[in-house]
Amino acid sequence: MNIKPNYPIAWVREQFPALKRTYLDKPVVYFDGPGGSQFIIGAIQAVSDYMMRGAANLGGCFPTSRETEAMIARTREDIVTLFNAHDSAVAFGPNATTLMFHTSRALARQWNQGDEIILTELEHHSNLDSWRTAAEDKGVIVKYIPLNTNTLTLELEALPQLITPKTRLVAVGMASNCIGTITNVKAVSAYAKEVGAVVAVDAVHAIPHLYVDMQDVGIDMLFSSAYKFFAAHVGMAVIRKELFESLKIYKVVPASDIIPDRLEIGTQNHEGIPAVSEAIRFIAQLGSGDTLKEQIISGYKAIEEYENELAETIRTEMRKIKGITLYQAGDNVPKTPTIAFRAEGFTPREFCERMCEEHSVFIAAGNFYAKTLADKLGISERGSFIRAGMAPYNTQEEVQRFLDGVRSLMGS
C-alpha cells in the first residue's frame, strides 16, 4: 500500500486516547467511524476545562456567563471558517436531525398547497422525513431524485424534469453515510438556483472526510454533527443570513428572536461546544498555510489522500473474497472511505458479532437510517448492510487485520 509518507499517522493516533483500548487482549480496531468517531484529546480537555472553570447560562453579568458567551462566539467563527460560510449564521442544537426537524417546520410556514420540494432516494432519513413530513402538513408535493441501483449514484439527469417554478426546496446529502457515494451537490444547486429554491445539505457524513465550501457549492442550509468529526455531541445548522432572518421559528415567547439564537431552542450543550473548535484545529494541523482556512483545506486534502488509500485496498481485496457482495459506486465516482457489503452465510449482525468477538474489529450492521436505499436494493428484510468506515486515525495494519478477519470468517 502506497501511503503518503508525509501523513503523520503516529501523531494522529496520539490525539485519540480511545485507540489505546483493548478487547479480548487485542487492540481494538475502530471501523465504526461513520456512526460516530473517536474523540481527540483536545476536545476531551475542552469539555473538562469548561466544566472545571465554572459553567453558566447566557445573559448573566458575571464572568462565567460572559466567558460562555465568548466561547460560543469563537466556536461560531471557527465553524464559519470551516465551511466558508461568511454569509451565514451558525446555530447549535442536540444533533443534525433535531435541527433539520426544527428548521423544516419553520421553512414550511412559507410554503403553500401545491408547492413542491425535491428529496433523494440516497438520503439518511433525517434529510428525508424532516422535509417530507413538513410538506405533508402543508399539502406540498414531494418529488425524489431517483437512485440508480446499478451505479449506486443519483440520476441527476432527471433534475431538469423534476424542478419547476413551484420548487421551493431541494434537500440532498453531500455523501451517503451508508455506501459512501459523494454527490455533485454543486450541480444540484445550480438547477435549484434557477428557480429560486432553497438548497439544504446534510453534510454529517461528509465533514470527517472532505472539505465543504458552502459558497462555492451554493448551499443555503447545511447541517452537521460534531460527534462524527472527533468532537462532541453538538449539532450545527449553518444557514444563509438572509434566509435565516425570514424563518419564523417555533419557540417560547421570551426566547431571543435574533439569529441564530431563535433556532437554539432551550439551553445548549455549552460544555460540548468548545470541543468543536478543537476538532477544526485538529484538521487544520494536518495542513499548511498562512490562514486557518488554508490550513483546513490542505488538512482535508491530506486526510482524503490517506483515507482513500486505505479504503481502496479494502475494496480491491474484498472483491477477491468469495461470498462477499460490495455495495460501492464505480471507480470513477468519488466516495468517502465507507464500505458497505454483505457476507453470504451470515446475517449482517452475526458477521459483525463474529468480527468483534474473534478479531476485536468493530464494524456495524443495519440500514443506518438510509432505509430507502436498503429498500431499493431489496435487502431491508435481510438485515440490510455491513458497514466498515475509515477515519484519519486508522492504519495499514488495521486494514490488514480487518481483511484477515473477513477472510477467516468466509473460509478464504
Image (cartoon, rainbow, N blue to C red):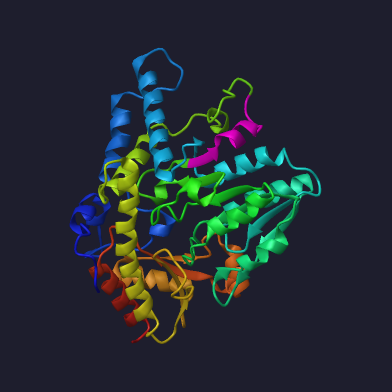
Considering only vertical position in the picture, is 28 above or below 400? above
Magenta residues, as a range? 236-252
Instruction: Say if the magenta span includes residue 242.
Output: yes
Instruction: Say if the magenta span includes residue 279.
Output: no
Considering only vertical position in the picture, is 73 above or below 147? above
List x then y, in percent, for residue 206: 44, 55
Q: Is residue 30 visible?
A: no
Position of 130 with respect to 112 (left or right) is left
Using the rendered view, name the quadrant where residue 77 is placed.
top left
List x then y, in percent, for residue 117: 70, 52
Position of 132 with respect to 66 (left or right) is right
Q: Residue at x 42, y 43 (%)?
A: 233
From the viewer's side, name the closer residue of 271 and 153.
153
Which residue is the extreme one toward the front? Answer: 194
Considering only vertical position in the picture, is 78 above or below 32? above
List x then y, in percent, for residue 395: 25, 65
The quadrant of the picture occupied by the C terminus is bottom left
Q: Residue at x 33, y 81 (%)?
A: 407
